[in-house]
Amino acid sequence: MRGGKRAGAGRKPGARNKTTAEVKELAQAHGPDAIARLAHLMKHSDSDAAQVAAANSLLDRAYGKAAQALTGQDGGAIEVIAKLTWAAKSSGK
């Protein structure tokens, strides 16, 4: 058999490669310092934009990002149109 999917081949679904796991571990080591820096910027930055950005980052990490509504044209509902076509069955004669 050539090509195609082979049973048991490849990485298991959801499995991360070794490099991804190592990078994630290194980044997580800086997590507490990064959160502390964001909190400091939120409270003490001279820039309102920096304060808002830091506050948003902290909120996103604490509670997850806000849901984004899906809307159609002009903010209205999304309209779904499905077109079904049937072909006449030939009698085979």
Image (cartoon, rainbow, N blue to C red):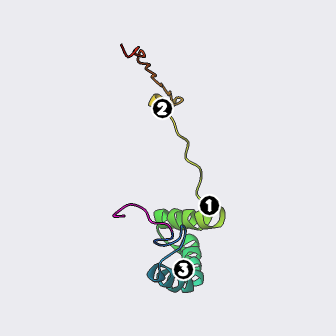
Q: Quadrant of residue 40?
A: bottom right
**Label drawn at residue 51:** none
Cα separation, mark 1 vs mark 2, equals 25 Å
Residue 18 falls within the magenta-colored stretch: no
Name the N-terminal-most of marks 3 and 1.
Answer: 3
Name the N-terminal-most of marks 3 and 2.
Answer: 3
Q: Mark 3 highlights which residue?
A: 34
**Amino acid identity at mark 3:** Ala
Q: Please identify the residue farthest to the left as the structure is shown.
A: 2
Measuring from the top left, give residue 81's x and y in whole percent. 48, 25
Residue 14 lies left or right of residue 87; in this view the side is right
In the rendered structure, which segment of residues is drawn in magenta? 1-7
Cα separation, mark 3 vs mark 1, equals 17 Å
**Amino acid identity at mark 1:** Gly
Observer-nearest residue: 93 or 61? 93
| Secondary structure found at label 1 | loop
**In the rendered image, which quarter contains the C terminus?**
top left
Residue contact at pointers 3 and 2, CB within 8 angstroms: no
Q: Mark 1 highlights which residue?
A: 64
| Secondary structure found at label 3 | helix
Measuring from the top left, give residue 48's x and y in whole percent. 49, 63
User: What residue do we see at 43% from left, 16% from top?
Assistant: 89
Q: Is residue 59 above or below residue 39?
A: above
Observer-nearest residue: 5 or 91? 91
Measuring from the top left, give residue 25's x and y in whole percent. 54, 84
Q: Mark 2 highlights which residue?
A: 72
Residue contact at pointers 3 and 1, CB within 8 angstroms: no
User: What residue do we see at 51% from left, 70% from top?
Assistant: 8
Measuring from the top left, give residue 33's x and y in whole percent. 56, 84
